[in-house]
């Protein structure tokens, strides 16, 4: 039987710390602002954006929301990004993904100032992650690191297996584990024997977007299991990439979905916005 890692509780602590630091900055006349852009009306994106706004309110960060219609052109979106790059009130810019198909996400991300790129998606910040010279931590992988730290289990020297190789989660996740001296294996859709790799993991991070792909028989006794997946089942319920019921019999610590990694991503975004405001104040 495993201990359930409470992402809501860990994220609340992170947000409280950000709130306290923002309050200190305000005493010095420094405010922090986050611009959030959403294009179209994808229901899941709307929920994320609403939660980001609520987190800003909690932390005392000014939030500026730009809800654009699905027909917005790439040029119009890039013009807005450039306007926000120059806006003194705005420390962080987040463009909610996915964008409608007619817009090239890369072109938009490339136009966000690296100094305001609180998602850490810009190639400059991705490169910085590679060499361990962080200004902004990639939100979801950084949230996972906080959750692992909350268990008291050290990453150093551990077999870490990341399932998934996306630019947003899998690749930066592998880097953060590596920087913390884990021995890291990255598995993906072409991996020959996924179960065999997973069974070696002391720390297993699943981020593939396949419901319940990782089952209890693929988990080493006592492993820490972190589930980044958010999949909507036909019955409308959310489930992760890990089959929670069988996995919890093997893991020492495990995250639930929802209530595990999800709240951490937003908390780390708040932390990055604070970092951006501090960077600007130090200029
Ligand atoms: N869509 C899903 N996750 C994210 C995220 O972390 N940042 C942005 N901008 N869009 C997302």
Image (cartoon, helix red, strand yellow):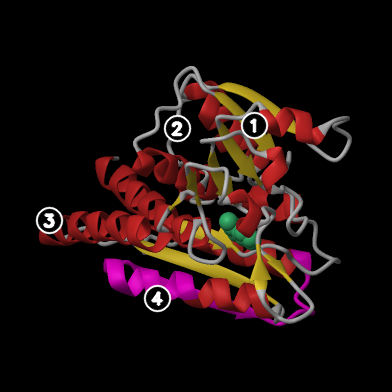
Measuring from the top left, give residue 68's x and y in whole percent: 65, 79
Cβ atoms at labels 1 and 2 below 8 Å apart: no
Cβ atoms at labels 4 and 1 below 8 Å apart: no
- What residue is shown with label 4? 54
Mark earlier in primary sequence (3, 4): 3
**Alpha-carbon span between mark 3 and mark 4:** 24 Å
Mark earlier in primary sequence (4, 2): 4
- Mark 3: which secondary structure? loop
Measuring from the top left, give residue 156's x and y in whole percent: 44, 20
Measuring from the top left, give residue 113's x and y in whole percent: 54, 48
Say which of 138 and 180 sits in front. Answer: 180
- Residue 126 visible in the current orientation: no
Which mark's residue is nearer the viewer, 3 or 1?
A: 1
- What residue is shown with label 3? 28
Q: Residue at 49% of width from left, 23% of height from top?
A: 179
Up/down of 224 relative to 30, above or below:
above
Where residue 134 is drawn, which disc sits there? 2
Please rate how many residues cluster around mark 4, counting C-alpha atoms within 10 Å: few if below 14, some from 14 to 19, many from 20: some
**Alpha-carbon span between mark 1 and mark 2:** 23 Å
Q: Residue at 38% of width from left, 69% of height from top?
A: 55
* Picture quadrant of residue 153: top left
């Amino acid at each position: 039987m495993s201990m359930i890692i409470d992402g809501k509780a860990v994220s609340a602590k992170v947000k409280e710390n950000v709130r306290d630091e923002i309050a200190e900055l305000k005493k010095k006349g420094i405010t922090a602002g986050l611009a959030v852009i959403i294009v179209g009306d994808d229901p899941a994106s709307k929920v994320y954006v609403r939660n980001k706004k609520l987190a800003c309110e909690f932390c005392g960060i000014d939030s500026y929301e730009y809800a654009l219609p699905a027909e917005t052109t790439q040029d119009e979106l890039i013009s807005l990004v450039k306007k926000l790059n120059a806006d003194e009130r705005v420390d962080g810019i987040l463009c909610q993904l996915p964008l409608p198909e007619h817009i090239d996400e890369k072109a938009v991300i490339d136009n966000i100032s690296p100094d305001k790129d609180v998602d850490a998606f810009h190639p400059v910040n991705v490169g910085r992650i590679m060499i361990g010279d962080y200004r902004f931590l990639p939100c979801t992988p950084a949230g996972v690191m906080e959750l692992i730290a909350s268990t008291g289990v050290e990453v150093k020297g551990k077999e870490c297996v990341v399932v998934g190789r996306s630019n947003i989660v899998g690749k930066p996740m592998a880097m953060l584990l590596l920087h913390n001296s884990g021995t890291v294996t990255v598995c993906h859709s072409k991996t020959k024997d996924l179960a065999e790799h997973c069974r070696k993991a002391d720390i297993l991070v699943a981020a593939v977007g396949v419901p319940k792909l990782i089952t209890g028989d693929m988990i080493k006794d006592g492993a820490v299991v972190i589930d980044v997946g958010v999949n909507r089942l036909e019955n409308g319920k959310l489930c992760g990439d890990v089959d929670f019921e069988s996995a919890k019999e093997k893991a020492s610590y495990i995250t639930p979905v929802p209530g595990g990694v999800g709240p951490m991503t937003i908390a780390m975004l708040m932390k990055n916005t604070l970092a951006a405001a501090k960077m600007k104040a130090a200029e």
